[in-house]
């Protein structure tokens, strides 16, 4: 049978837009994008797991600044700038003697390396036999500190000795290489970009430039900081991971605004670096705390007066097409001003002043109608107030007062009443008050474990989905696994802060870091549980991942407090290295002694032979000698 096709008319195909090459590569790219949906969450899980292992599983040696030597060769290392001494197990330097009170005294290191001792209990505290007065007393190297009937010799380490100890401390990055984790993060970003270009028809050059600049910026930061000798990058990598997820959400929502987002990201990282450098000097930090108090209250007051009302709240200031949310920056100021050093914690008027400051901030937020942010501030207040006072009664009193405040807000703010009434009943009003949450839960469920693909969702078209319901967007487009990785990243940072609390130089850094993560976790709980209708919907953002310049900048600035609590060797440029502090007599400051050692002029303390008293003697044991690891007595 012969088939003649010579007369077949194919003119009707000439009007079709048919490109076999584009069709072939289009099908291939879709296939690869579909495959990448299963790879993306696993890489996100790998990134978070590597950071968790490095931050929480590996063991790092703490810093040591001085020692107390008791009778019987008992040595108590002083690992903080502010150390509490007493009989209790929770103190920094435990002296198990019935004559010593549970909380007896504290030793505080000043910015110039000078140490001051304060008596805290009813028991007497002496320095070289002189009673310590309420204002404290200076204590110097080789002085005798007496608590009750127990005497100890104080040994302040020199710069040379601190440098020697630093050599025995392990730096991060030996078992879990930060460069490899950064490379995984870059692969994560490339997959997201590929999915956006495949699934999102509006994604174009702006999205490509956005992800490209993000990758270039993070590798530039890594290279510069790594060249400076720092090896701890886990907090930044987790923040970059969350910011990358936020950039993908921004590309799905408004791909044409990617340049704006990348500029805001650059400003955020720039201010993060500034904050890290600023808090290196604790004296400078303390000098401007009062200004932070007034700035925080002033910003909220200006917002209350000038901000237009939106959906029952006044929390945005408008400058033409540019808008900011001052309450996000107040979070930074609140933590900056609320954290305190140990010498201020025992002064009641300081705690009273802080309570008044907190009441003013929360009260102004309530008047503004920003109930969610007010709740976040209140949770942070509870954490800081307990850490500052150590008194549960203060916390219970604050909770009781807050309960009355909530009742007042609920009675005068109709939109807050509506949210509480809708709580747990969103499916009964799917086109009314439950409109957003019903769609967020439906979209999240449709994403499953691995998601529909970045740029392939519909929830971003719902009002405020990219901010207040961003967890639903993440679950829809990137899958539940990626959404849980985002939550896990913040939980890892919180665990890191808790671990650092026992080795922090100053209570200021410990309190600031704990307050930062308390605030961020409170936001995560309200954002995730509010989206899923487990808690009332409050409109609180997800740290780093929600689209919004004010929120992104504030989160990166607060991350500096987390870096300030990182005391691992060579881990953070927000922390000065121990050998770079002034204070104490080093080799360069001393004169050679008669035995070839170094004598400070006070009887051969640095003598390597037979100096009187032998406190720092490297030779045979002398009566009354006091030991230092490495041979110093």
Image (cartoon, rainbow, N blue to C red):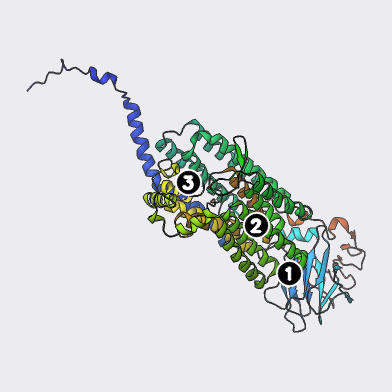
The first of marks 1 and 2 along the sequence is: 1
- 285 relative to 481 in the view: left or right: right
- Percent from the top left, x then y, of residue 217? 59, 39
Q: Quadrant of the N terminus?
A: top left
Which residue sits at x=56%, y=47%? Answer: 240
- 260 relative to 150 in the view: left or right: left
- Label number found at residue 77: 1
Q: Nearer the viewer, residue 360 or 594?
A: 360
| Label 2 packing within 10 angstroms: few (<14), some (14-19), many (20+) | some
- 461 relative to 100 in the view: left or right: left
Q: Quadrant of the C terminus?
A: bottom right
- 435 relative to 300 in the view: left or right: left
Q: Nearer the viewer, residue 543 or 402?
A: 402
| Label 3 packing within 10 angstroms: few (<14), some (14-19), many (20+) | many
Considering only vertical position in the picture, is 316 above or below 538?
above
Q: Mark 1 against mark 2, which lies toward the viewer? A: 2
Disc 1 and disc 2: Cα gap in Å?
44 Å
| Label 1 packing within 10 angstroms: few (<14), some (14-19), many (20+) | some
Considering only vertical position in the picture, is 85 above or below 40?
below
- Percent from the top left, x then y, of residue 169? 67, 60
Instruction: Name the element at disc 2.
Output: helix
- Percent from the top left, x then y, of residue 254? 49, 37
Label 2, on which residue? 363
Which residue sits at x=64%, y=41%? Answer: 267
Label 3, on which residue? 465
Q: Which image quadrant for residue 11?
A: top left
Considering only vertical position in the picture, is 179 above or below 629?
above
């Amino acid at each position: 049978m012969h088939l003649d096709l010579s007369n077949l008319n194919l003119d009707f195909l000439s009007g079709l837009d048919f490109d076999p090459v584009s069709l072939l590569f289009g099908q291939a790219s879709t296939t690869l994008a579909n495959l990448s949906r299963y790879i993306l969450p696993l890489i996100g899980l790998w990134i978070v797991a590597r950071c968790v292992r490095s931050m929480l599983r590996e063991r790092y040696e703490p810093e040591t600044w001085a020692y107390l030597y008791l009778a019987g060769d008992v040595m108590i290392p002083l690992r903080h700038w502010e150390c509490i001494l007493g009989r209790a197990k929770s103190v920094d330097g435990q002296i198990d003697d019935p004559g010593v009170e549970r909380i007896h005294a504290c030793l505080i290191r000043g910015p110039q390396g000078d140490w001051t001792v304060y008596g805290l209990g009813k028991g007497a505290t002496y320095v070289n036999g002189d009673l310590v007065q309420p204002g404290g007393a200076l204590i110097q190297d080789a002085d005798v500190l007496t608590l009750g009937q127990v005497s100890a010799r104080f040994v302040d380490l020199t710069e040379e000795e601190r440098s020697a100890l630093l050599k025995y401390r392990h730096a991060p990055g030996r078992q879990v290489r930060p460069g490899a984790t950064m490379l995984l993060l870059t692969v994560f970003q490339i997959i997201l970009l590929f999915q956006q270009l495949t699934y999102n028809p509006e994604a174009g050059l702006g999205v490509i430039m956005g992800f490209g600049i993000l990758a270039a910026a993070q590798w530039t930061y890594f290279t510069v900081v790594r060249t400076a000798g720092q090896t701890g990058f886990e907090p930044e990598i987790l923040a970059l991971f969350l910011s990358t997820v936020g950039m993908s959400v921004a590309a799905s929502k408004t791909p044409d605004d990617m340049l704006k987002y990348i500029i805001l990201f650059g400003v955020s990282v720039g201010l993060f670096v500034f904050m890290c450098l600023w808090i290196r000097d604790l004296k400078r930090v303390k000098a401007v705390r009062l200004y932070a108090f007034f700035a925080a209250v002033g910003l909220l007051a200006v917002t209350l007066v000038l901000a237009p009302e939106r959906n029952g709240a006044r929390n945005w200031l408008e400058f033409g097409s540019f808008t900011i949310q001052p309450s996000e920056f107040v979070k930074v100021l609140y933590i900056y001003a609320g954290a305190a050093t140990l010498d201020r914690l025992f002064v009641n008027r300081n705690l009273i002043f802080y309570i008044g400051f907190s009441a003013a901030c929360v009260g102004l937020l309530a008047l503004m109608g920003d109930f969610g942010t007010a709740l976040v501030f209140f949770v942070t207040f509870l954490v800081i107030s307990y850490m500052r006072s150590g008194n549960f009664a203060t916390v219970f009193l604050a909770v009781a007062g807050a309960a009355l405040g909530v009742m007042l807000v609920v009675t005068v703010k109709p939109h807050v009443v509506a949210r509480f009434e809708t709580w747990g009943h969103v499916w009964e009003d799917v086109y009314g008050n439950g409109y957003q949450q019903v769609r967020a839960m439906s979209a999240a469920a449709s994403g499953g474990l691995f998601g529909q693909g970045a740029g392939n969702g519909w929830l971003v078209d719902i009002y405020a989905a990219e901010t207040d319901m961003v967890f639903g967007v993440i679950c829809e487009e990137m899958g539940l696994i990626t959404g849980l990785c985002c939550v896990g990243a913040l939980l890892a940072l919180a665990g890191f802060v808790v671990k650092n609390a026992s080795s922090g130089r100053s209570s200021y850094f410990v309190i600031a870091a704990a307050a930062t993560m308390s605030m961020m976790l409170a936001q995560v709980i309200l954002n995730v549980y509010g989206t899923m209708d487990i808690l009332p919907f409050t409109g609180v953002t997800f740290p780093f991942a929600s689209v919004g310049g004010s929120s992104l900048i504030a989160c990166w600035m607060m991350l500096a407090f987390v870096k300030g609590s990182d005391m691992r060797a060579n881990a953070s440029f927000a922390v000065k290295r121990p050998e770079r502090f002034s204070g104490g007599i080093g080799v360069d400051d001393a004169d050679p002694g008669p035995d070839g050692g170094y004598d400070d002029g006070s009887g051969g303390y640095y003598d390597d032979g037979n100096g009187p008293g032998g406190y720092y003697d490297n030779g045979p044991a002398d009566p009354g000698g006091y030991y230092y690891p490495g041979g110093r007595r």
